[in-house]
Amino acid sequence: MEPVNSASVTEPEDVVWLRAGDALAASARREAAALARRIGFTDRRVADVSLAVTEIATNLVRHAEDGAIALRPSRTGGRVEVECLCLDTGPGMADVAGAVRDGHSSTGTLGIGLGAIDRLADTFDVHSLPGRGTVLLARFRAERPVSTGEFHGPRPAAAGLTRPISGETVCGDTWAVRTAAPAGDDGPGSLTVLMCDGLGHGPLAARVSDRARQIFRETTAEHPRDVVALLHEGLRGTRGAALAVAQVDLRLGQVTLCGIGNISAFVVEHSRRSALLSHPGIVGMQMPTARTYTVDLPPGSALVMHSDGLHQRWSPTDLPGLLTRHPSVIAGQILNQAGLRRDDAGIVVVPAANR
């Protein structure tokens, strides 16, 4: 169902997670090609996507200690793209820019290298922590790109990522972002962001999160406290959820948040992070009086909201340079470093505007 207001809503698409293993290159190529065909890519562009994703998967298996690839459709400005997000646990790269610039490809791969993946993709970005892991993003449009560089392509206002608990194919966590119609051509003035964790995991938890996302999509309410109240009423009779709703004013550089349950929310800067308060309770079952908190979102910072499928011990000082990257890479690297495989995991990232 389309939202009843004039704002646009960005939601998670179906994600296919593929763990590292001997068959990863073949399965990644097959899934990427099927996804590209499903959303209308030409045979030539399907071949481009297949080649790039196969090289990404081959490099992951050959050189990384462990990792996974996430494939999903991604919507940007009304256009559907194929997104490949590769996460590994090391050894990392000391000179990412050099590897991309030189088109380096190690012995035993297809030989096209990072530089060629960069040229085949419309959006390309990499963040690497030597000894700890790398996140690589490649997104593909139906048309062949013409630009190159270590980072190119539009930088969206927000991005999120979910990963199911080991052994499940659906995730009980979800996210959504509603973008207010901009006053001009310089981007959105404000965003409303939902991060939701349905109690438990698997299909029953996913059902609660899907219902929460539907309510969020259809409401015209703007203030986070009002949105949470509507979610509480709409989730009655379900197992309930922990969730938080944030309103981000990009022009003023402020975040207003209303959170209930184990959803973590931080304003993250390069050298520190500031936590936003959330109150105990279960939305749809037992909820205290909803309260909101407003904090600054300085230029160069980001709002990060995640479920308890990520531990809270991660620090921006351990992730140098991450906030300059694409929001999908920011979300992927934090999940990569802080995610718990014994639980569903979900994260959404909103970078501050450069005012």
Image: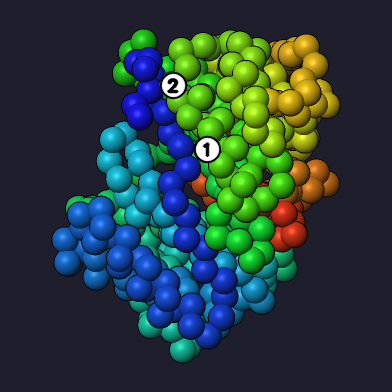
* Residue at mark 2: 218
212 or 136, which is in the foreground?
A: 212
For the residues bearing labels 1 and 2, Cβ distance under 8 angstroms:
no
Q: What residue lies at 43% left-to-right and 46% top-to-bottom?
A: 13
Tell me which label, 1 or 2, sits earlier in the chain: 1
Q: Disc 2 on helix, strand or loop?
A: helix
- The residue at the point 35 percent across, 54 percent down is 82
Percent across and percent down for residue 220 are 46, 12
Please state which amino acid type lies under the numbered disc 2: Glu
Q: Residue visible at 79% across and 48% down?
A: 311
**Residue occupying image coordinates x 38% and y 82%:** 110
Q: Is residue 248 above or below residue 325?
A: above
Is residue 335 in view from this perspective? Answer: no
Label 1 packing within 10 angstroms: few (<14), some (14-19), many (20+):
some
Q: Is residue 343 left or right of residue 141?
A: right
- For disc 1, the marked residue is 210
Point out residue 30 in the picture as x, y percentages from the top left corner.
Answer: 35, 73
